[in-house]
Amino acid sequence: AKKAGRNTLRFFDPAMQEKLSVRASLESELRYAIEKHQLALYYQVQVDDNHRLIGAEALIRWIHPERGIVSPVDFIPIAEESSLILDVGHWVIDTACLQLAEWAKSAEKKHLMIAVNVSAHQFRALDFVQSVHQAIDLHKIDASRLKLELTESVILEDVDEVIAKMHALKALGVRLSLDDFGTGYSSLSYLKKLPLDQVKIDQSFVRDLAYDPNDAIMVKTIIDLANNFRINVIAEGVETELELEILKDYGCRLYQGYLFGKPVPIEKLQFSAI
Ligand code: C2E
Ligand code: CA
Ligand code: CA
Ligand code: CA
């Protein structure tokens, strides 16, 4: 009885209660965030080895009237637990395509790509390919400017089905990047099975690259593997010149990270060489 009492007490832990209620209210508010125009895409530059802009990753933010800027880390997992992620994901792709249509009008910007994050739940939806197709048609964009960042979690499901879907996306002309590479469960054998244009080295491997020999080996291995499979490779979380030098030395040619720029609202994106 004493034990049960203790457990009951734990249930009334005020900190946990507070967390739960924040979560419940975020979920109900998120339901209306799109209609109220509270979602925004920030953009973080991606550059080549001449430090020239190749495009940007779109990273969602929730501009909340009371809470301020809410990080995707705090609301994407909540959205993922319901069909809300489908609405959010659709909004992200539509907004990115609208931006690509804008860039297409400019001679200096028409070659730039936008990478968007696709959650596993969103990818699994039956009409996912069709919804990407519709966004491309609606905004009359060159599909090859749109890059979808998929995480290894999409591959956990029926692999053949996932591969078929990826081929259908490739047939539309969009590019596919495998995000957070090395952090998940997928085996190396997937790399040759999946129709990928790019793998992205997760920032957790780049962070201590200069000091941790295990991370250095991991990064070097991913780069060699990608280069051998003729898949391009981009490193995220590049913060220092030293990290950049090591990545270059290892044969990585594309980079993203605070060294080049933080995610910013579109009007603050820097288009000149960095
Ligand atoms: P991610 O896709 O791995 O994105 C990279 C995260 O690292 C971003 O965090 C970015 O701001 C941050 N970052 C970039 N460069 C650096 C750096 O040099 N140093 C450090 N310390 N961090 C850096 P952010 O914007 O908070 O996004 C977090 C995660 O939320 C993303 O991780 C992605 O999984 C998810 N996310 C963001 N936008 C979307 C979206 O539109 N849809 C979905 N489904 N998920 C999204
Ligand atoms: Ca990403
Ligand atoms: Ca990452
Ligand atoms: Ca570092």
Image (cartoon, helix red, strand yellow):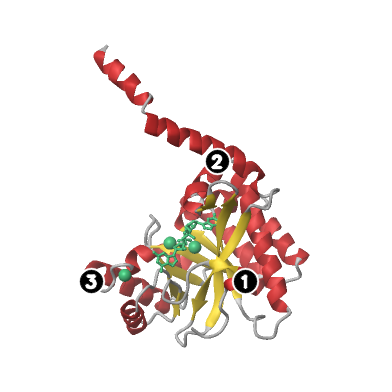
**Mark closest to the chain's N terminus, 3 or 1:** 3
Q: Label 2: state its secondary structure.
A: helix
Q: Label 3: state its secondary structure.
A: loop
What residue lies at 49% left-to-right and 33% top-to-bottom? 21
**Mark closest to the chain's N terminus, 1 or 2:** 2
Q: Label 2, on which residue?
A: 26
Q: Label 1, on which residue?
A: 267
**230, above or below 41, in the image:** below
CA gap between label 2 and label 3 equals 39 Å
CA gap between label 3 and label 1 equals 36 Å
Q: Are marks 1 and 2 in contact (CB under 8 Å)?
A: no
Q: Is residue 207 left or right of residue 274?
A: left
**Mark closest to the chain's N terminus, 2 or 3:** 2
Q: Are marks 2 and 3 in contact (CB under 8 Å)?
A: no
What residue lies at 70% left-to-right and 56% top-to-bottom? 131
Residue 173, percent from left and from top: 65, 71
Amino acid at the residue labelled 1: Glu
Q: Is residue 182 left or right of residue 154?
A: left
